[in-house]
Amino acid sequence: MFANHKYIAFETIVIKEIRRFSRIWLQTLVPPAITIALYFVIFGNLVGRRIGEMGGFQYMDFIMPGLIMMSVIQNSYSNVVSSFFSQKFQKTVEEVLVAPVPNYVILSGVIVGGMARGLAVGAIVTMLALFFSDLRIEHPLITVAVVLLTSAVFSLAGFINAVFANSFDDISIIPTFVLTPLIYLGGVFYSVQLLPTFWQVVSGLNPIFYMVNTFRYGILGSSDVDVYWAFLILGVFIVGLYSSCIWLLRNGKGIRT
């Protein structure tokens, strides 16, 4: 009976999160898809013709996995940070916290909701990619696994940002000054093999670099990183971020007033 009670709570939170972004799909799903489509046209098609090949593939094929992953990362993160902070701002989060529901159920529902938006935008971008490239997936299981884990990582990161944010301005600082630079320096548009040794080492400190390249390996069968090492890094991030989120919920840090 208690297990059923927790499942209903989890399902309710997930449905609420999905309805939240799907109700305003013109703001949440369409704009990022249009943005990535412009990347395909400008960088993949126009610039790519002059570049030729990158990493043994046509430039359009090379950047396609990175652009799909970029859309998943940005939207998984932004959905959770905006949703949970809005609940804090409107004081409705207190109603959830006083309910007889374990913290891990609340957190899981919010995170799955963020993943749903990230994966939805990723699916739309993937369909758009079919108009620009002959999409093929060399390793389906690896492709699915890495996109799910990456979406979970940045949904958790968005939750932490929302907890510590004190204003709507605060929820845009991390995406602007941390997340965006890491994405653009994560090998989306280039192969790390083109960089000097020093910058290859610096790229190795960027977690997004491993996520993008593992996703590229799943689709194209080629990567600049060890795939097993990348999955280990993803696992460490998920455990660390999930534990941090549970601790923040338990202690009411930045949530209870």
Image: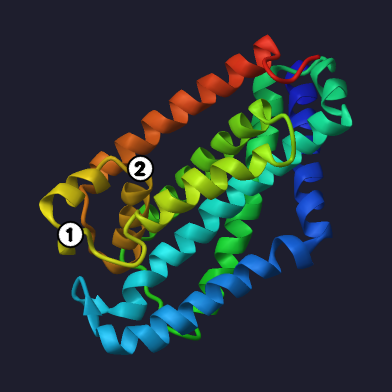
Q: Indicate the amino acid at tag 2.
A: Pro
Q: Quadrant of the C terminus?
A: top right
Query: Tag 2: Cα neighbours inside 10 Å, few (<14), some, or many (≥20)?
Result: some
Q: Nearer the viewer, mark 2 or mark 1?
A: 1
Residue 242 or 3: which is nearer the viewer?
242
Q: Quadrant of the N terminus?
A: top right
Quarter of the image where one finds residue 155: top right
Q: Percent x, y for residue 222?
A: 23, 63
Residue 230 or 254: which is nearer the viewer?
254
Rendered image coloring scheme: rainbow
Up/down of 71 relative to 108, above or below:
below
Up/down of 173 relative to 133, above or below:
above
Residue 11 or 157: which is nearer the viewer?
157
Q: Indicate the amino acid at tag 1.
A: Leu
Q: CA distance from mark 2 to mark 1?
A: 17 Å
Q: Percent x, y for residue 71?
A: 53, 60
Find numbered disc 1 in the image and state the secondary structure of the residue it sits on: loop
Can residue 33 be seen in this snapshot?
yes
Specify the label residue 195 is tagged with. Answer: 1
Specify the label residue 49 is tagged with. Answer: none
Quarter of the image where one finds residue 160: top right
Outermost residue, left direction?
197
The residue at the point 45 percent across, 24 percent down is 240
2 and 1 marks in contact (CB < 8 Å): no
Up/down of 8 relative to 175, above or below:
above
Q: Which residue is mark 2?
A: 207
Find numbered disc 2 in the image and state the secondary structure of the residue it sits on: helix
Can residue 113 be seen in this snapshot?
no
The residue at the point 67 percent across, 15 percent down is 253
12 to the left or right of 37: right
